[in-house]
Image (spheres, grey):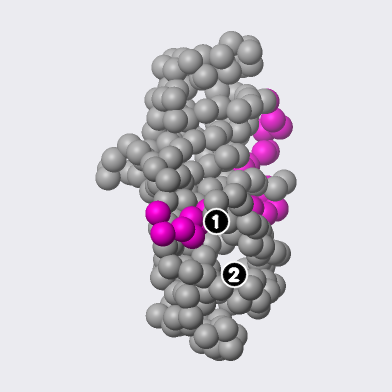
């Protein structure tokens, strides 16, 4: 049994300057920054668990983490986190949970948002948070493709690694228009394979550009062949938007 209080932390961050959530020898990570800050505040070893191990450059609006530590005043701990964490990592909420709560095992689903700028020139302040696709896109055909991807499938064609069970449920994929020829792709599902969301987005963009025919999409899914689907969309356009429990 783990000693201490089970703390749940809701975290937002810009992943631009980090090598993903998980600690790595490749460079700074969100996990490392959070762990070091908590250990500085609490003066005890801290182990972080998270709902999603976002990749290098990926952002989060509501990442869910937990850690076990001594019983501490929540208001003081939360204030210390806000003060000491780097400015591109923000604790949104801190609460005490039952000891059995686990951010990964208890998650029922996740929602990701991917942002695309579809103008010849992208304004600089969107550069780190959306994929610049300067050539025209057929959004209606992309919408029809999204409908074909929705549902429960073997998503091996959209994964950059192999799984014993690559079957996943994608509950919805929608394309939502924003100002200035920007749009976001909203993808919601139970859980996702490695780089699956970015591979779905890359495939939709290739379909919108006419590089992949809409009629070929069902066969691509059935093929389980990663080489037949579209490119892996750049990390910087992706946000972990929400985790469902």
**Residue 123: x and y, percent?**
42, 46
Q: Quadrant of residue 150?
A: bottom right
Q: Is residue 115 magenta?
A: yes
Residue 181 picture location, percent across and down: 55, 56
Name the mark nearer the viewer: 1 or 2: 1
- Residue 32 sits in quarter: top left
Circle 2 Cα neighbour tier, 10 Å, few/some/many (<14 / 14–19 / ≥20): some
Between 183 and 13, the residue placed more toward the observer is: 183
Q: How many marks?
A: 2
Question: Are there few (<14), some (14-19), or many (20+) residues within 10 Å of tag 1?
Answer: few
Closest to the observer, 211 or 228: 211
Which residue lies under the disc numbered 2? 139
The residue shown at (52%, 19%) is 82
Instruction: Identify the residue position indicated by label 1 in the image.
Output: 181
Q: Earlier in the sequence, mark 1 or mark 2?
A: 2
For the record, the magenta segment spans 96-121
Q: Residue at x 63, y 56 (%)?
A: 177
Checking the image for residue 101, the label placed there is: none
Residue 187 in the magenta stretch? The answer is: no
């Amino acid at each position: 049994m783990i000693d201490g209080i089970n703390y749940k932390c809701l975290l937002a961050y810009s992943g631009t300057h980090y090598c993903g959530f998980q600690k790595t020898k490749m460079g700074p990570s969100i996990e490392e920054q959070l762990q070091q800050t908590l250990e500085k505040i609490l003066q005890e070893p801290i182990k972080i668990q998270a709902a999603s191990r976002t990749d290098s450059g990926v952002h989060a609006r509501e990442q869910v983490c937990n850690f076990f530590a001594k019983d501490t005043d929540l208001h003081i701990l939360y204030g210390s986190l806000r003060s000491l964490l780097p400015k591109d990592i923000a604790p949104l909420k801190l609460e005490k949970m039952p000891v059995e709560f686990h951010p990964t095992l208890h998650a029922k689903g996740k929602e990701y948002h991917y942002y695309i700028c579809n103008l010849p020139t992208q304004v600089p302040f969107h550069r780190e948070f959306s994929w610049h696709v300067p050539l025209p896109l057929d959004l209606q055909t992309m919408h029809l493709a999204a409908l074909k991807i929705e549902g429960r499938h073997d998503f091996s064609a959209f994964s950059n690694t192999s799984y014993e069970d690559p079957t996943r449920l994608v509950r919805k994929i929608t394309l939502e228009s924003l100002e200035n020829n920007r749009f976001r792709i909203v993808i919601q599902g139970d859980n996702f394979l490695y780089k699956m969301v970015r591979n779905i987005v890359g495939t939709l963009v290739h379909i919108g550009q006419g590089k992949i025919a809409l009629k070929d999409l069902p066969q691509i899914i059935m093929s389980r062949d990663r080489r037949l689907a579209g490119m892996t969309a750049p990390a910087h356009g992706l946000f972990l938007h929400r985790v469902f429990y």
